Image (cartoon, rainbow, N blue to C red):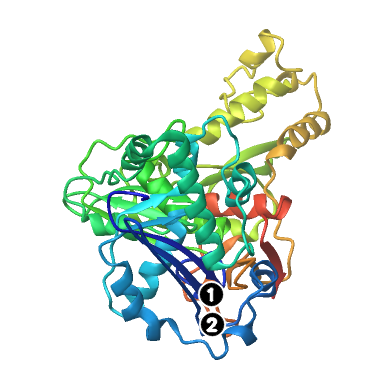
Amino acid sequence: MLFERPCAIVDLETTGGHISRDRVTEVGVILIDGERVERFDMLVNPGQPIPPFIEQITGISDAMVATAPPFADIAAMLLDKLRGRLLIAHNVRFDYGFLKNEFKRLNLPFRSEVLCTVKLSRLLYPQHFKHSLDSIIARHGIVQAERHRALADADALYQFLQQAIAEHGQAEVEAQAAVLMAAPAAPPGIDPEVVEQLPDVPGVYSFYGDDGQALYVGRSDNLRRRVLAHFGTEPRPHKDVRIGEPIKRIEWRETVGDFGAQLQELQLIRALQPLHNLRGRLSQELCSLQLTPLDSGFLTPRIVLASEVDFSRLDTLFGLFRSQKEAKKALAELCAGNGLCQTCLALEKRGARKGACSAFALGRCKGACIGREDAASHNLRLQQALARLKLQSWPYPGVVAVRETDPVSGQWQEHLFERWCYLGSRSEEAAVPQGTPTFDADTYKLLAAFLRKPLPDAELRVL
């Protein structure tokens, strides 16, 4: 006997790891009712190509599933076998998520209590570091006919559970399983089904309050894990945001990769102005510094606003600041750290007697204010000090695209830019994103960082 209730040990093979885009190629199930054990497996036609990478791992090819039934043809039978059972799988969110999505496409509701054998292994065998199925098979000496086939992997889990009960006792295994099966907490007023639907994929999410006010926008490479962390069911990240207001609605958008998630996060923060996102509350008085020559020959930094000039078309700007106050503070620090003149940089008004600036008396100015340093020397030091703040010029003749590609499914999404302005995203070559390009400091920094160090599974295309 495994547990004091009907169980189903399930393993799926799929075309990839994305529960929304990919499809099931094989189902393996072991049904357990007390001492009665029933096994069955079947290939499934996914209705889409199996990537070579997946075929190499599983051995399941397009030819093998060509004459297999589609999931729709086996759905009723499978649902009847699984209904009312505890669903057990290794990394159960994967198998359960795929099953729910396959049934959902057919308008067949499916919910089940689930038990993850990865987490169960961690609780029962904390002395071991690895808990993958390969590690468990090796650790427990499990004999398996073939790896990465659905029924064989399900049978490996069955053997593992039998050994765990023999070593720890039925009561201990069931007690640890009960801990893991505790329902994930959700805020009052949030439908538990919404929590169940959270996918284990990259994307951006948003929380809303009673009056529809956006409370917080965040992103993650795993939406489900990150969202649940806010409610205490997953480890909370360091310096996580504390949200005091009641959360009444949760929304999310899936992305192909992390760059798209970061980009969507910036767009949503800008559009929604969430209460708990610092960037959403900051002044939008975007400004920069531009050098202007004076009649005296000295160059002086002038604060220019993005609302007055097109930052995307200038290559003579230094730094991006969210307010004039922030720009003046940065300029003052630059002046003090490089022995520059306060009056030449317009940080201090020149008196009627045209004496030395206050920094000269402290030994922080070389005397440009009283003629002891010529304009050429001061200008050179000013330009050298500003060099690290210089905005990067647009290095391309026109539009570029950051293309992210799912390494398994091959699905891609492109994010288009011109002169640092975000134009929109697309998933088809012919699609033309619509929108008015505007220069945004955070988008500039995101794209500039990508150009310096591209992210995995993403590439830049010059269009």
Q: Residue 393, which numbered label? A: none
Query: Residue sitting at 54 percent across and 50 percent down?
Result: 441
Q: Nearer the viewer, residue 419 or 68?
A: 68
Q: Amino acid at mark 2?
A: Ala
* Relative image position of residue 399 (x, y in whole percent): 65, 71
* Relative image position of residue 151 (x, y in whole percent): 52, 67
Query: In the picture, which quadrant includes the C terminus?
Result: bottom right
* Relative image position of residue 417 (x, y in whole percent): 60, 66
Residue 20 against residue 201 in the figure, above or below: below
10 Å neighbourhood of mark 2: few (<14), some, or many (≥20)?
few
Q: Amino acid at mark 1?
A: Arg
Is any atom of residue 28 visible in this view? yes
Describe residue 152's horizontal placement relative to residue 434 as left or right.
Answer: right
Query: Residue sitting at 30 percent across and 55 percent down?
Result: 113
Residue 446 against residue 382 in the figure, above or below: below
Q: CA distance from mark 2 to mark 1?
A: 6 Å
Describe residue 406's horizontal placement relative to residue 185 as left or right.
Answer: right
* Relative image position of residue 258 (x, y in whole percent): 56, 55
Is any atom of residue 309 visible in this view? no
Residue under label 2: 431
Q: Earlier in the sequence, mark 2 or mark 1?
A: 1
Describe residue 379's horizontal placement relative to residue 319 as left or right.
Answer: right
Residue 48 against residue 362 in the figure, above or below: below
Secondary structure at badge 2 equals loop
Query: Residue sitting at 54 percent across and 82 percent down?
Result: 431
Residue under label 1: 426
Q: Are marks 2 and 1 in contact (CB under 8 Å)?
A: yes
* Residue 459, quarter of the rendered image: bottom right
* Residue 8, quarter of the rendered image: bottom left
Q: Nearer the viewer, residue 239 or 278?
A: 239
